């Protein structure tokens, strides 16, 4: 897999989080638990990404100057990675609840904690940016708030069945989203709410994200590790709300 072929970018990383959320029922139905290899790839790729980003941020901090261009490059990577990591971590926590274990949750906590440290470092440096770049800072913060909200939406639809909201940014908000999804399924079946999420994510969120390729090779390992946990048939949905990522991955796997 190459970033060019699969378009690994802020947009596709967020889109993969949507795919995981949509596929969660099929994953629970067809998979006992993610393989040790996929969990190892998930953990290792995140730790390497975090080390890379921390080194970049440390260089800037040592020269005591906030670099708005670096922050504009890193913020979409960090914030969209958090969407994917927290959604997948919720899936792992749900597996633990069903299996009566905590091994997967402990791995997820480690990864989420590391990303949170990077986030706090980015936000701290944003506070040091000069007033002349205030509009650029506000744009980054707007992206952060959008990412946080969509994270809670996608987490909530997975977490509600097993009451595992640990990895939401706002557990109460995620629970509200989850309860709405359960109500929609009861009243109308599972497809309408799923399609509403897909349409909303594309129309009000993905359109604001860049298609510029992420050059960090760790994203390839991260994406592979998560995709390996999704049954092939879960990527073969018909209809207008099938994601472009699902189409590309399914075509490649045939």
Image: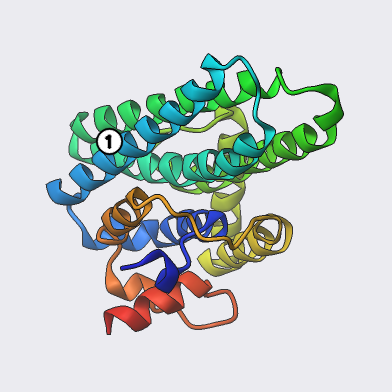
Which class describes the residues within 10 Å of circle 1: few (<14), some (14-19), or many (20+)?
A: some
Residue sitting at x 68%, y 60%: 200
Residue sitting at x 47%, y 53%: 17
Residue 148 shows in the view: no
- Under circle 1, the secondary element is helix
Measured as percent of width and height from the top left, residue 227 is found at 31, 61
Q: Is residue 156 above or below residue 183?
A: above
Measured as percent of width and height from the top left, residue 146 is found at 68, 42
The colour scheme of the drawn protein is rainbow
Residue sitting at x 24%, y 36%: 96
Measured as percent of width and height from the top left, residue 48 is found at 31, 37
Residue sitting at x 38%, y 35%: 52
Residue 122 shows in the view: yes
Of the 4 image quadrants, the one containing the C terminus is bottom left
Q: Quadrant of residue 94?
A: top left
> In the image shown, does 160 or 225 lie closer to the viewer?
225
Measured as percent of width and height from the top left, residue 155 is found at 49, 43
> In the image shown, does 201 or 31 lie closer to the viewer?
201
Q: Quadrant of residue 103?
A: top left
Of the 4 image quadrants, the one containing the N terminus is bottom left
> In the image shown, does 207 or 174 lie closer to the viewer?
207
> In the image shown, does 104 or 220 lie closer to the viewer?
220
Q: Is residue 125 above or below residue 107?
A: above
């Amino acid at each position: 897999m190459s970033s060019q072929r699969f378009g690994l970018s802020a947009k596709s990383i967020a889109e993969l989080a949507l795919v995981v959320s949509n596929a969660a029922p099929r994953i629970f139905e067809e998979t006992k638990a993610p393989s040790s290899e996929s969990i190892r790839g998930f953990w290792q790729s995140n730790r390497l990404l975090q080390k890379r980003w921390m080194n970049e941020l440390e260089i800037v901090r040592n020269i005591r100057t906030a670099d708005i261009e670096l922050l504009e490059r890193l913020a979409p990577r960090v914030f969209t990675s958090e969407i994917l990591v927290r959604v997948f971590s919720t899936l792992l926590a749900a597996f633990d609840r069903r299996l009566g274990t905590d091994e997967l949750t402990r791995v997820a906590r480690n990864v989420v904690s590391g990303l949170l440290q990077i986030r706090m470092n980015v936000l701290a440096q944003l506070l040091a940016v000069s007033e002349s770049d205030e509009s650029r800072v506000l744009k980054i913060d707007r992206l952060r708030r959008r990412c946080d909200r969509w994270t809670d939406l996608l987490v909530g639809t997975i977490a509600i069945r097993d009451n595992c909201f640990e990895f939401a940014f706002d557990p109460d908000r995620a629970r509200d989203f989850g309860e709405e999804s359960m109500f929609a399924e009861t009243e109308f079946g599972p497809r309408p709410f799923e399609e509403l999420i897909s349409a909303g994510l594309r129309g009000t969120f993905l359109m604001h994200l860049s298609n510029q390729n992420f050059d960090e090779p760790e994203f390839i390992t991260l994406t592979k590790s998560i995709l390996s946990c999704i049954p092939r048939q879960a990527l073969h949905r018909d209809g207008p709300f099938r994601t472009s990522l699902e189409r590309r991955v399914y075509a490649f796997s045939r």
